[in-house]
Amino acid sequence: MAQVIQRLMLAQTMIQTDNHTLATAQARRCLVIHNPTAGRRRKKRMLAVVERLRELGCTVTAMQTTQRGDAEAFARAASADDYDVIVAAGGDGTVNEVVNGMVAGTGGVALAVIPLGTANVLALEIGLDPKDEERIARAIAHGPARTIHLGVANGRHFVLMAGAGLDAHVVEGVNIALKRATGKLAYVVESAKQAFGYDFPEITVRANGEIYEGRMAVACKGRYYGGPFIAAPGASLESPKLEVCILPKTGVAGVMRYGLALPMNRLSDLPEVMVISAESMIIQGPRGAPLQGDGDIVARLPAEISIARETVQLIVPE
């Protein structure tokens, strides 16, 4: 921890201000935590946003991660005495790390995003176009804050969703080099591979005093899943509820059926798909099977999933 704090201090290029509150009309002190694996073009976009933030009067300190866990450690060490906003510059996995650091830290700092990832689901939820550098900068500099409720799976917080079944196996098996080179195509390739080799074991969801059976289950905090595709139309970041999609069909036919319905935003309309609301649940299946959260593996089955006690202030566009 001492090394992390020292790195924070060495990286600071701050202009001192008497303002220690989050206000839309005054300059904000921003800590930008950047994942360098986003690629050269996306890094250029991030630098453009940082430059615009400074033009808008914000104080910006940039920290670059070098390994998994750095984003979480930087966010945990950041204090409200030094920063008003922690900006996660990367994909939804980077956001997840930052949020887990924030809830374990001193508190009092808001969250903002510079979307540089493959799906950028959180950006979709709040209406941010990843290519609109001006709007991103203005949101960070002047946007209002909304209180969002987090989910927690076996002690690990998530912002958007937590899923068990085929999607978690795809996340675990996706080729990282291919993902960096092709983006979403890597997930399509891995999904096709898994569809022919995965045995689709039964998964049970215990929630609201009931037991539900399926082959895949996703607990959603937001409406979107995997991109601009609505899986849980009733879900909301601001709601202290989880919307749980339970999919029962197996095999290649089931994958194709759900894979076609999702881009049409008709997944929840399929007659066999169950969507339930719950504050907590237990997902059971093959012991040790992966559970993905915000696009990364965050836990193993069996998993206890619930609404977290902690909330986060999320900066959104005006």
Image: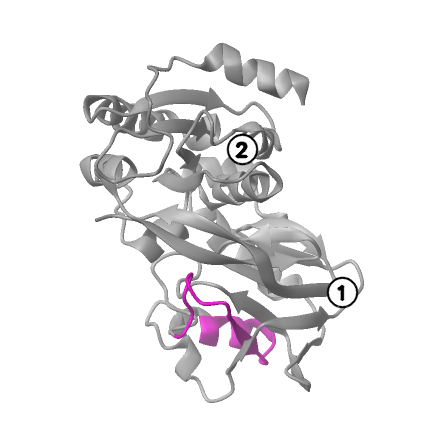
Question: How far from the left and from the top, in percent, is residue 39?
Answer: 40, 28
Question: How far from the left and from the top, in percent, is residue 125?
Answer: 35, 57
Disc 1 target residue = 302
Specify the quadrant of the image occupied by residue 38.
top left
Q: Which residues are magenta?
A: 234-258
Disc 2 target residue = 75
Question: How far from the left and from the top, in percent, is residue 99?
Answer: 53, 43
Which is more N-terminal, label 2 or label 1? Answer: 2
Q: What's the residue at 19%, 22% (across, down)?
A: 55
Q: Nearer the viewer, residue 138 or 177?
A: 138
Foreground tag (1 vs 2): 2
Q: Relative to 141, is 269 on the left or the right?
A: right
Q: Nearer the viewer, residue 236 or 34?
A: 236
Q: CA distance from mark 1 to mark 2?
A: 29 Å
Q: Relative to 285, is 94 on the left or the right?
A: left
Q: Is residue 105 above or below residue 232?
A: above
